[in-house]
Amino acid sequence: MNDGEIACRQLVKTYNLGQPNEFIALKGIDLEIKEADLISIIGPSGSGKSTLLNLISCLDTPTKGDVFIEGTAISTLNGFERARLRREKLGFVFQQFNLIRSMTSFENIELPMRFEGISTGERHKRVEELLSLVGLEDKAGNRPTELSGGQQQRVAIARALANNPKIILADEPTGNLDTEAGKKIMDLLIKLNKEEKKTVIVVTHDPRIAKAADKTVKIQDGRII
């Protein structure tokens, strides 16, 4: 497998809601994502889209089956190794932004690099590059409460890119944004895919993202249809 390649093999995810109640969120998903693909995952609420993204991102573990990232089976990794894989290979963008409210844009973007022990000079250079990439050079000193929703999401994308991951995973990144802000986020994700050659996987209800994707995966009742 090359950098950024992902394979899902017979993924099953079951949630035990207490006997005799059991909810099967995913029912044997097989999926291959190639390096530098732009993939949209669509489907109705409760279909299993976010569950699939959580398994690919190592935030959850499958009941059966496995996820392979660049040839490595996630099931073979211990907790420390999974955490390292998330830090080094994956970047996350959430619908709720998940920025630290007491920190400036600069500090939010810098934070992942602190955990990696990157020198102050390198961190500051990288943050400035990322602020330029997302068009927020003038918002470095602003805290989240001083930014619009679209600006917060662009900071969140810059933070996801801090450690230069090959794979970007986004869960409804335009869900809380108006049309214009959503278009800017969509354009930025497409740019990261086309120009930066990032593998981008987006769970979305936004038909514009689905239209721009190399492949659209539709999930219904826990299966790809």
Image: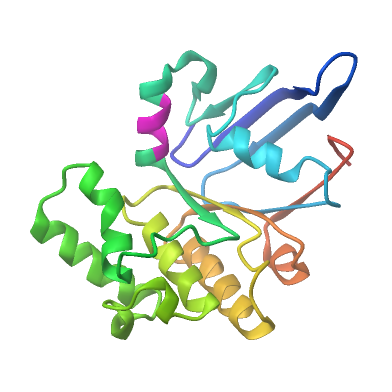
Asked if residue 115 lies left or right of residue 93, the reply is left
- Residue 75, how many percent across, how many down? 54, 17
Q: Residue at x 36, y 23 (%)?
A: 80
Position of 102 relative to 47 (above/below): below
Q: Residue at x 56, y 72 (%)?
A: 185
Q: Residue at x 60, y 60 (%)?
A: 95
Asked whether residue 76 is drawn in magenta, I would say no
Magenta range = 82-86
Asked if residue 13 lies left or right of residue 54, the reply is right
Asked if residue 129 lies left or right of residue 185, the reply is left
- Residue 221, how many percent across, how many down? 89, 38
- Residue 124, how many percent across, how many down? 17, 64
* Chosen colour scheme: rainbow
Q: How many marks?
A: 0
Asked whether residue 85 is drawn in magenta, I would say yes
Position of 129 relative to 183 (above/below): above
Magenta span: predominant SS is helix
